[in-house]
Structures are given as C-alpha cells and as structure tokens.
Amino acid sequence: MATSTPARDAYAPPPGGSRQTTARSRRQTWRSRLWRFDDKASPYAYIAPFFLVFGAFGLYPLLYTGWIALHRVEMTGLNQMEWVGWGNFDKILHDSEFWTALGNTFLIGVMSTVPQLLVALGLAHLLNYRLRASTFWRTVILTPYATSVASAALVFALVFRADGGLLNWVLHFVGLGDTNWVNGHWTSKIAISVIVIWRWTGYNTLIYLAAMQAVPTDLYEAASLDGASRWQQFRKVTIPSLRPTILFTIVISTIGSMQLFGEPLLLEGGTLGATGGNENQYETLSVYLYNYGWNLGHLGPAAAVAWAMLALLLIIAAVNWLIGRFVRTSAV
Amino acid sequence: MRITRTVAGRSRRAAVLVTTGLTASALLLTGCSSDSDSSDNTGSDANGKITLTVADFGQFGYKEAGLFAKYHELHPNITVKEDVTSDEKVYYPKFLQQLNSGSGLADVQGIEVGRIKELADTKASSFVDLSKAINVDDWVSWKEKQATTADGAVIGAGTDIGPMSLCYNTELFNKAGLPTDREEVAKKVAGGWEDYLKLGEEYKKHAPAGTFFMDSASAMYNAVVSSNAKQYYDESGRPIYKDSPSVKQGWNLAAEAASKKLTQGLAQFDDPWKAALRKGTIATVACPAWMAGQISVNAGDANKGKWNITTAPGSTAANWGGSFLGVPKSGKHVDEATELVKWLTAPEQQAAVFKAIGSFPSNKGAYELPDVKNATLPYFNDAPIGQIYADEAKSIPETVLGPKDGIIKDTISTQINNMEQRGTSPDDAWKAATNAIEKVIG
C-alpha cells in the first residue's frame, strides 16, 4: 500500500496552480481526494470482516463471560442476575474438584504432548528421506487428524472397555486382561492420552516435515562431507533449524491440551462423562466447566472457570515465551 | 505507476467480493440458526398438512404402540414425528437450553418427574397451561399436582407412573437353584429389601459364572427412597437429604449390597448396562413399570421369555419416575399439539402403551379398562403386570418433590456405583456425594 502512495500523490494538482478551475482539474482534485481516501481507508475495509466477526463471536462473548462470572445466574432463569462479585471464583478455588480437574488437565497434557511431539519428530525425519510413495505415507499419517473427536473417542471407548474391550482381550493372552481402564486414575489418563496422541501426531508430523523441507540441503551435504552420521545430522542440523517450529507446536499443543474436552466427555459418555468418571479421575477443566454450567445449571461458577482457564493459558504462554527467549539467547 | 493502480483496483474488487461473500455467509449462518426445525415444521403446506414433533427420552412407547400412525389415520392432515434421546440426563440440559433460546423446541416435549418441580418453579411461563384442555381429576391425585404451578397452571399432562416391581431372569434363577415361580419369588422377598439381599446371597452361592444378582444397587436405593413421602426436600423446599431417613435406609442397603458383591456395579442406562442385559449376566433388576420396556428393548428378542416380573420386596408401595408431556408456547401449532397431548394421555392410549411396553398409566380412567386390568407382558412370560402394578399403585405415597431431585438422585447413584466398582468405603462415598450435592444445590 505504502509504495503506491507517492504514485497517487503525483496526480494531485500542484499547490498554487492555475486559479482557472477547469472542469477537468476539478475532476482531478475530486479524483485525487477519492484516491487518497481509498488509500487511507481501504486497508481498514480489508481487515474489517475479521474484526467484526471476532468482535461479535470472540471479544463480546469473552467479556460477557467475565460479567457472568461476577453474578449468580441459573440455567433455569437466564434473565435473573444477582451480583456476587468474586464469590464464584472463591467457590471454585475452594472446590477440591477444581484442583483435581486442574491436576488432571496438566497430567494428561504432559502425558499426551511429550510423546506426541517426540514421535512426530521421528516420523517427520523418516518421511523426509526419499522413499517410495511418499505422498501416500504423508496422507496416511494425516488421516487420524481428519476423523472427528466423537468417532475417535467412541472407537477408543470400545478398545478400552473393561468388559469385552479389544485391549483387554489382547492383554489376556499375556495374563493381564482385567484392567478396568476408565476406572483407574492412571489408566484412564493413559487411555485419554492415547486418543489425543493418535489424533494429533500426524498433524504435528506434517508441520515438522514442512519445516524440515525448508532446511537448505547444502547444510546436510556439508555435514556429510565432514563425516557426520545420519543421527548427528539430525541432532546438529535438523533440530536447531526446527527450533522455532518446535516451539510453535509446543505452544499449540499446550493450548490444545488445556482445552481438552471431547475425549474425556465421550470416553464413557452419559452421566459419567460429564463428571469425568465416577471419581472425577479423568475430569479436565473443560469438562468441569461443562458440568457446572450445563449439568448443574450454575452458569456463574462455570464462567469463573472459563476465566481461570484464560488466566492459566496466559501464564503458560508467558512461561513458554521466557523459555523461548532463553533458548534463543543461549543458542549462540 | 499503472501497475500499482491496476493491482490496487483488482484487490479492491477482490475485497468487495470477499466482503460480500463474508456478509452473505454471515447472513446465511444467522438465517439458518434462527430455527433449525423450520424445514420440517413450516406451518402448513398447501393442503393444510402439518407435522408435529414430539421430543422425548428413553421409551415412551408411542411408537411401539403404533399411536403416532393411528393419530395420522384419525387426522390425515397431521403427521407426528418422534425425536428420541436415549438418556434423560443428556436430554434435559439440551431441553433447558432450547427453552432459554426459544428455538429448536419440539411441539411436544417429554418431562421427567425429577425435573417437573424445577420447570414448574422456573419455566412455567414457557409452557401452555393444560388445565383447560385436560381434566386434572382424571389423573391419580399426586400425579397432576406435581405438574401444577403455584398459581394453578398445569405445565404437563401425566403419561405414566412407576409403581415398583421386581424383574428377574428365570433362566439364571433356575441355574442358581432358586425358585422361578412368581408367587414363590414374591414370598421370598415379602419381608422387604433386606430379604432381597438375603436372596442375593443365596443366588451367589450357586450363581452361574460371570453373572450377578443385580445390575446396580442404585436401583434398589431408588426403590427404597421412593417408597417414602419425604425424600430429598421438605414441604418448604429446604433440602433435607442429609438427615432424610429414607435416604439413609436406601444408602445402607446399597452399601451392604456393594460390600457383599451382589451387584455388577453398572451405571444404569449406560452402554455397558445395555450390553449386560443383552448378554444376560443380570439376575434381577428393581423394576418400576417403565423399566420393563428398557429391559425388553435392550435385552432383545434373544432373551424373550427368560424374564419374569413379580411384586416388589416389602409391603410399602413405591413410585420411581414417570413422566409428563408439556407443550412449549413457542411452537407453531400449539392448539394441535395440545390436542395431541390430550389424546396421547387419554385412558385408551395409555392402556395401549401399557400393553405394548408396560409403562403404567397415570390416568385413573385406564385402570378399569380390560387392557390394563388383565394385561400381561409376553416378553416377560406373560407376567400379569396389570394386577401387579394396580395393587402397588393404590398405596403409593404422595411425595414431596424438589427442584433438583433428578440430579441429586443421579449423584448418589454415581457414588453407589463407586462403592460397587472400587470398594470405596460407605463413609468416603457419602462424603463425596454430599460434596457433589452441595454443588448441585449451589
């Protein structure tokens, strides 16, 4: 845009020009004004749709949720709002279930993100080699991502079923076939992490692959001339070049695991899904929010949970940013 | 220079296109979401034909009894479509949201007894007052009282009530060396639910491998609580579940059943529960009238004739569940929907449902019909359910309802489930239950 400005201004009449305002020059000034207006205003018009949509569907709900969080509002009477100030936050912070959900969210987040990104890195490295039918493999690796959360969760629910589940059937050949996966505090978290890993590994693999393709080949050539093995090339060339991408996937996965909802809700489904298991053993913050708002019908505390989650995400983002800065400055 | 201008020009055109596109799609979006049912609910078409939708949960039995088809025969211009959610706990929150937004509601909505008080207290203005269309005195007295608001409006017409009985699997009883005859089983549990647990221990001694005496102790708990007038709330609307004698009694029995491992510990109506019925691993289910429909549907034809029904343990009558049909005011065909509700809850139709799936009528006029009096359920070895339930229904106490009855019951059921499945101690489970209920009452 800025580059075209001088060009437009060239059409402006020279200052103090002829006082004889012919129709043509009037047209010229009018036109030039239009151009100048176009210049100044059109960028705003271009970005307006996003901001309008974001304002209506992003910002307004966000602020209104904050407003609800300070009130007592029931699902059975949305128009009756009673001011309670910080009461809702106080309520959830004194609720042991909130802390359970927070711990679960964090644990499941770590248990799903770390293996997922490591496996994705390895897979991307393998796909980066010249291999037959590479497009086919790249497509295959993305297919889990294309399935819906609901169908994935339902299929894995069948796999992890205690009674007649596929996994227990396989395990009973090794003599360990009676694990009640969804009831155990660790096993249920493992089950959910498996669903998440299954769905998102391919997605991250492709992001890594794209970044690896952008690494200049002469770096590898130079490295192999220096006698670096494949593993050394991976460690000394690939990983450092991928650092920003890795940071990006960590941030995205963190946000994703913070909002984990569909998998725990549908693993058992029904009543137990809404409370994250019969002892809240796999209840995440989103499920806790959902249960408070939709199952119990208390929208105030539910909104408070939403804002607490936002605060947590901002803290995590800040930590990520600090780590990123530290990594950047230390990697000289 | 020119180049930049043409580029600018083209991008301006593009921007205009993009904005129009966005606006159009935004309009489309809002247009579509305003009424999701508009497509199949467009008032009446050229011939004055209309479609009425009935949203309900579980087994209301109208389809099984062929009532919608019959209604269409009687009123050729009206087609009735049913939209069923299998689990009421999933159905209700969605229903509440639709009530709040005023869109997506069906013409007729089912309401469970655990929710009726809350809706009568808070959402009465969203429902048509049925007291003009139906004669409330036709119903058993306590039934319509439950759906009546403080100022006398009736928000729902009673469909069924849930007098208690005992469903048992004759095949498993036989294998475990227990009597299979209705009378004899009834005699064995005549002393009440304590006897029922004793029978369970007898069953366990020779039980076929992998089978359990009951599906879940929470059903038994519910049976005990619902045989009392006072359950979770007192008349003034104060929650009293902590000291309620009926809750305590039910809880202790459930804890005993769990500790003696008499139950399979399944959450009722969830998939594993349905699967267990299909596989035939459950010997008994505490059976409010509507439960028979659940069992026959989920156990399937393969188990036809293996089940039987006898009188519930003890002599105190209990009512668990039962539902209502309400007409939301926001519907397009309020009058026709009201007519449909009136027809569906009339004695003959309630009798037809009873005959089809065993949900017991709440309309007193049905009790004298031969279809009800002499009713037997083929699926359950022709059990004389008409007689069993009618005897029970006579002495059902008038219960005090509260707004959160439904969720409180579910919460306690979850903790009973914990005692069964994990061996959680009754004290810990009770503490968890009270914590959760405090949150429910909020």
Image (tube, coloured by chain):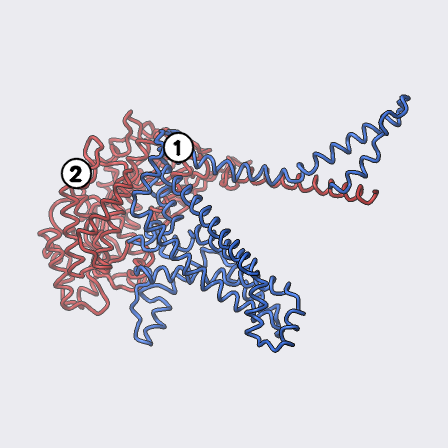
Where is B423 relative to B92, above or below? below
**Whether marks 1 and 2 lie on the same chain:** no
Give the chain letter at badge 2: B
Q: Which chain is blue?
A: A
Give the alpha-carbon distance from disc 1 to disc 2, as whole Å: 32 Å
Q: Which chain is red?
A: B
Secondary structure beneath disc 2? loop
Q: Nearer the viewer, residue A245 or B164?
A: A245
- Residue B223 coordinates in the image, percent (x, y): 19, 48
The residue wearing badge 1 is A78
Residue furthest to the bottom in view is A227
User: What residue is drawn where x is 10% and y is 57%?
Assistant: B188
Which corner quadrant holds the N terminus of chain B? top right
Would you say A165 lies left or right of B216 here?
right
Residue at 29 percent of width and 41 percent of height: B440
Looking at numbered disc 2 in the image, what kind of residue is underneath it?
A: Ala
Task: Using the image, determine if residue B178 lies above or below residue A68.
Answer: below
Picture quadrant of residue B109: top left
Q: Nearer the viewer, residue B217 or A265?
A: A265
Kind of residue at disc 1: Leu
> Which mark is drawn over residue B229?
2
Q: Is residue A146 above or below residue B68?
A: below
Category of crowding for the residue at label 1, using alpha-carbon neighbours closer than 10 angstroms: few (below 14), some (14–19), many (at least 20) = few
Q: Nearer the viewer, residue A44 or A318?
A: A318
Mark 2 is surrounded, within 10 Å at the Cα level, by few (under 14), some (14 to 19) or many (20 or more) other residues, namely some
